[in-house]
Amino acid sequence: MSRAAPELTVDSVTGIDVSLAVAGPGARAYAFIIDWHIRLVVALAWYVSAALLYNGHLSLLAPDTAQGRWFGLVLLPAAAIYFLYHWVLELAMRGRTPGKRMAGVQIVARDGSAPTAGALLSRNVFRLIDCLPVAYGVGLIAVAFTDEQVRIGDMAAGTLLVYERLSAAPAIAGALLPGSPLDAAGLELVQELLARWSALEAAARSRLAQQLLARYGGDGSVAPDTALRSRLERLTGT
Amino acid sequence: MSPSGNDAARRRALAASLLERAPLWRAADQRARRLARAVSDDAEDAARLADDYRLLAHDLARARTLIPQTRTREYLEAAYARAHAALYHGAWHLGSELLKLFRDEVPAVVRWLAPYIVWSTAIFVVTLLAGFALVHRYPELIALFASPDLIASVEHGHLWTQGLLNIVPSAVLSVQILANNIVVSLIAYCAGFLFGLGTLYILGLNGLMLGAVFAFVSQHGLAAQLFAFLAPHGFVELSVMCLSGAAGAAVGDALIRPGHATRTESFRTAALRSGKLLIACAVLLVGSGVLEGYVSPDPRFSLTARLGIGIGYWLVMVALLSGRLLRWPTAS
């Protein structure tokens, strides 16, 4: 039996509550893996390029002399990129990182607002506990066994990781036509297929078009690509 | 037409009229985004946000009933949440957030933690005295607290800190020290998660070690040198250790005595409040690390200069933690 995804519900004076879907361990891990790769690649890129420039020849090893400058110019920035990545970016991007953005999640406070700087920093302090013993074991166990799917850092900071819902309005080009067999969901599907028509492979778009036409009472028989597109356009009234 | 057919037609007509309002939602959403990013200072924009909020709430309620399984409803949920955040929480500025943290929130946490600070300092001092007494009475026990290299160095009549700058450059030394201190400080805090026992252990162990080493060096006539080495950075570094311990103890106390709240809720409240102090601690340890790398091992600094720097930096710490250091931006 599947468990319904938990939601953060915030009361409103309008009587219509604000509802945000809480991200689970999969989305968290996905975001973290992207972020980990980004910070590793950027830190390594810094190290390699700075070491090559510093040495002036093809060597990545520290020279015997000028240890302090090597440390300050090559090692320290690379280490800072790797270790301060989450601290700095979550602050600068209001609870997001590139990985979180790609995974479609963001950190919010328990009232649904952007978290405070103190909460974001506290959340990162507790990475020390969450990352134990290896590979964020404690954090993942906490996420798996808490109702709101939070790691210990989130518990401490009063934050949640929620899905970022659609940031762009769906392409509702026209209203539902009287007498059209399409309902609102069908209209969205057909319009989205038409919008992505040229980006899809011919076989895939034909198959999808036939399925949609069959579902909404149109002529779902096999037909050339252009004919299927015309049938879909007639269905939407465009 | 049958009653069910009539109902379907009615719902369809309502959904159609709802979808025609999409341009209004887009305009409302764009306004909320502008205001949330503080890229708009248009008073009319701000005034219309309340109308937008009501519009989105109204249409979302209809969408939840009429077209629940659609992307349009999803979009309305998101637009409504953004308008709610913009209306109730305003724009988010990193600078003012950080200023608020250090000027208002950290001093409030320090006041709240005052009893814990007293207790963690007392534990540290007691264990320091215990470590001193222990090694003073049984010198061979120093092997429990110090490395063989340190012991050999002191037995040969010089501190391990002498000539440190000849081995490691100041920049490297500073970063190594501050990174180590910050990690110890964070661990002392996070260890409070173990019902405060971890914090107690780390505080006690550090106190015992410092006391034991002081007793050992004093037996070899090097106590004044060690004090001179510690003076520039030690006042703040040891204070921060006690502060981190106090924050960890508060978390442990919240878990042991949750009061009327659940343990999780009590932990969350205590950790959210006390965690802010750790940010100030980390900042203070950066300064302390710089002093320990550049000033403490440098023999050109006299004891008076070292004490002046150490006490001066400690006073800066007190001013920061009491909120006085950053209060000037709001003075008018």
Image (tube, rainbow, N blue to C red):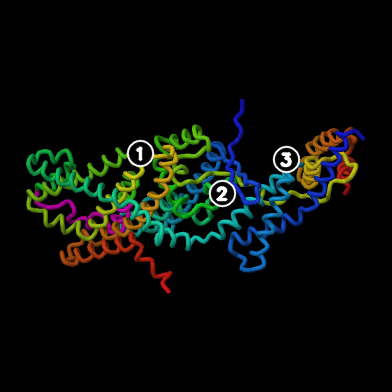
> Dot 2: what SS?
loop
The residue where tag 1 is placed is B257
> Mark number for residue A112?
2
Estimate the spatial distance between the alpha carbons at disc 2 and disc 1, rounded to whole Å: 29 Å
Query: Label 2 near label 3: C-beta < 8 Å?
Result: no
**In this rendering, position of residue B221 left or right of residue A192:** left
> Dot 1: what SS?
loop
The residue where tag 3 is placed is B68
Residue under disc 3 on the same chain as residue under disc 2: no
Q: Is residue B275 magenta?
A: no
Quadrant where the image shows the C terminus of chain B: bottom left
Range shown magenta: B156-178
Name which residue type carries label 1.
Answer: Arg
Name which residue type carries label 3.
Answer: Pro
**Mark 2 or mark 1, whichever is nearer to me:** 1
Name which residue type carries label 2.
Answer: Gly
* Above-or-below relation of B72 to A142: below
Based on the displayed image, in which of its 4 quarters is residue B227 positioned? bottom left
Residue A67 visible from this viewpoint? no
Residue A9 % position (x, y): 59, 43
Residue A91 visible from this viewpoint? yes
* Above-or-below relation of B308 to A111: below
Residue under disc 2 on the same chain as residue under disc 1: no
Query: Label 1 near label 2: C-beta < 8 Å?
Result: no
Of pointers 3 and 1, the one earlier in the residue sequence: 3
**Badge 3: chain ID:** B
Q: Residue at x 76, y 50 (%)?
A: A171
Estimate the spatial distance between the alpha carbons at disc 3 and disc 2, rounded to whole Å: 22 Å
Residue B74 % position (x, y): 69, 45
**In this rendering, position of residue A103 left or right of residue A51:** right
Neighbours of disc 1 within 10 Å: few (<14), some (14-19), many (20+)? some
Q: Residue at x 61, y 68 (%)?
A: B41
